[in-house]
Amino acid sequence: MSTVFSKIIAGELPGRFVWQDPDVVAFLSIAPLRPGHALVVPRREIDQWTAAGDGLFARCTAVAQHVGRAVQRVWDAPRVGLIVAGFEVPHMHLHVFPTWGMEDFDFGRADHNPDPAALDDAGDRIRAALRDLGHGAEVPA
């Protein structure tokens, strides 16, 4: 059975993509911890990060680092958070978001009703930063 992330990747459900390559994608969270919260997801359905092969896990973390650099540049955050939780969707994913303190890691504070225009703006800003950082080939139009 396809996960919600597989349906987003396949275009069956909408997603605000900021990165696409043959193995990994990144798109904005629909319940952001902070503006700019992105999810890095392998295209292949893998239930949890411990089941990913070394190469795929390394690729996901490399993409998370690239997205994190863009997020930090856009929001001028002192840190970029990275969480591998895995309870929300049974498809491995890494949460990448700007952070100003440990309270930003609390999923109980996620915005479950974000403004679509704010999400669109965040996606545009991350894509522009990724292009500026030399990743234009992986940034969707």
Image (cartoon, grey):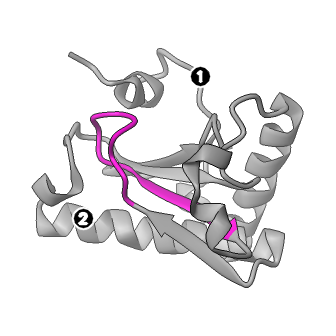
Q: Residue at x 45, y 48 (%)?
A: 25
Q: Determine the image quadrant of residue 47.
A: top left
Residue 105: which disc? none
Q: Is residue 132 above or below residue 52?
A: below
**Where does the N terminus fall, quadrant-wise?**
top left
Q: Residue at x 40, y 36 (%)?
A: 88
Disc 1 is placed on an element classified as loop
Residue 55, given in percent of the width and then of the height, sits at 17, 68
Q: Amino acid at mark 2?
A: Phe
Residue 14: which disc? 1
From where the camera sits, is residue 134 visible?
A: no
Q: Determine the image quadrant of residue 102.
A: bottom right
Magenta segment: 84-98
How crowded is the residue under tag 2: few (<14 C-alpha within 10 Å), some, or many (20+)?
some
Q: Earlier in the sequence, mark 1 or mark 2?
A: 1
Q: Amino acid at mark 1?
A: Pro
Q: What residue is disc 2 on?
A: 57
Look at the image and say whether residue 96 sits in the magenta stretch. yes
Disc 2 is placed on an element classified as helix
Q: CA distance from mark 1 to mark 2?
A: 25 Å
Residue 18, given in percent of the width and then of the height, sits at 61, 50
Q: Residue at x 69, y 31 (%)?
A: 112
How crowded is the residue under tag 1: few (<14 C-alpha within 10 Å), some, or many (20+)?
few
Asked if residue 109 lies left or right of residue 90, the reply is right
